[in-house]
Image (cartoon, rainbow, N blue to C red):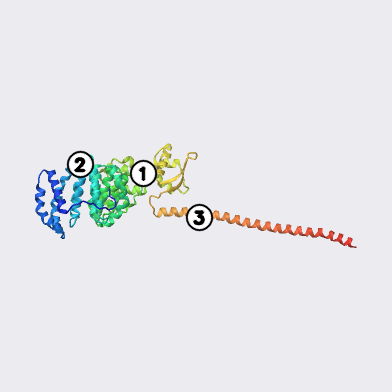
Amino acid sequence: MPAPTNTLLIEGSFAELAEEFAQYVDALRKEDTLQSEIAPLLQPIREQEQSEGEPDLKQRDEVLKKIVAAAAVLNGAPEKEIIPSYNLLVHLVHLASDPDMFLSRICAYLAKPITTSPQFGPTLAISILSTIFNTLSGNDSSRYHVLLAIVAVIRQSGSGYAFEALKPQLANQLPTWLSSWELDQEEAQKLHLAIADAATAAGDEDMAQSHVVQALETIPAADASKPAARDLAVRALAMALRRPTVFDFTPLTASDAVQGLRSSDSTLFELLEIFTSDTLDAYEDFIAATPLASISGGVLAESADALQNKMRLLTLTSLASSTPSRSLPYSTIASALRVSASEVEMWVIDTIRAGLVEGKLSQLRQEFLVHRATYRVFGEKQWSEVQGRLMVWRRSLEGVLSVIRSERERFAREGIQAASEEAKNGDKARFGDRRREQPAQASIEATAE
């Protein structure tokens, strides 16, 4: 898999290594044609190397054209010799004036089956391609062709292990790579679709959906009405509707190509609008009038159960987000979802697991207490609901502040009253002391007489 950039070191001059490679290719083909073809071209190169003069890169390129053209035979080499022979070829190509003109062809060879090792062929090809990728600088656009070949091998092999090994690189590095390679929109779209196909082959539908949407985002507004854009929009939309984990359709509705389906595939776009903001009632009315098999060539014909289940989750989400009391009776949920009362808790739990709502079920009171609910769309109606809830919250806070203010005033009054009573009691105590002091004084005066 792609890793930090490194260097491939092989000893020998260009002429020596080219001749060695030609001998190996001729041995595989059981003929001496390549050696005889490059021998005249290698002679001046060998003389330059012996005199330690500047290499003639154009002469090297002529040799490499013949070598690379014959290198397809390496896919039929003995298993243990495939990696060393390709490494030698890659080293020679790096000595060309422009390695890029040869690397794409080598990648095309490696994307094809390795006939002598059907079992381990994909692993060998990925290893060689990873070596090529890592010997190129980070901003070298040739890495794009190498990555495409790696993804193609993974897709053809259907290797979940290989794809899992590549996923962290795609998640962490792909945006940086795309930026540094300065790809045009068509190239970026091709890569995203290749990754999506490989993800599908490896069974990772979530990642496939993500890269199909990213491919959709590369379509410029001017091309949104073209057949290719329409096909990709239908594919992205059908995947999103089928996927049980996709509930946010905002990236799709923001796409010019998807918006173009209003005219080319109006029924599919209408279905998108239902899943974006409507409920199960509207969905069932739509399906009754428009069978799934008739929508966009039947892309959703086998997804009836998945669509209905998702629509139930979204309907419950809408109920939870629009209930002012934040308390949903089981009977209300059962009616909205077209299920029996005994199934309500199951559907609420599924909606919680999907991350659409949070709350607490009460079997005793037969209600679902909503703590949090996701807004499916956020428009004027939702702003009004938020305003209403803020007003309720404001009134609640005003009530709390009123209670606090009343308690504070009561506390202050009680404090003043206590202080006043304490002062009165102090005065009475001092007055009593003076009355007790007078007889004592009289007694002293009598004694003195």
Query: Disc 3 or 2, which lies upstream in sequence?
Result: 2
Going by the numbered disc 3, the residue's amino acid type is Arg
From mark 3 to mark 1, how far is it between C-alphas?
Answer: 34 Å
Instruction: Give left or right: position of 446 versus 308.
Output: right
Query: Disc 2 or 1, which lies upstream in sequence?
Result: 2
Q: Quadrant of residue 290?
A: top left
User: Label 3's element?
Assistant: helix
Query: Disc 3 or 1, which lies upstream in sequence?
Result: 1
Where residue 303 sits: x, y (%)? 30, 41
From mark 3 to mark 2, how far is it between C-alphas?
Answer: 75 Å
List the residue tagged with mark 2: 79
List the residue tagged with mark 1: 311
Identify the residue at image location x=20%, y=46%: 84
Quadrant placement of the C terminus: bottom right
Instruction: Give left or right: position of 105 versus 309.
Output: left
Where residue 173 sits: x, y (%)? 31, 52
Residue 383 is tagged as none
Badge 3 crowding class, 10 Å Cα cut-off, few under 14, some 14 to 19, many 20 or more, is few
Q: Quadrant of residue 441?
A: bottom right
Badge 1 crowding class, 10 Å Cα cut-off, few under 14, some 14 to 19, many 20 or more, is many
Task: Count how many numbered circles sit on residues in the image.
Answer: 3
Going by the numbered disc 2, the residue's amino acid type is Glu
List the residue tagged with mark 3: 394
Where residue 61 sits: x, y (%)? 15, 55
Q: Residue furthest front?
A: 51
Going by the numbered disc 1, the residue's amino acid type is Met
For the residues labelled 3 and 1, say whether their Cβ atoms are less than 8 Å apart: no
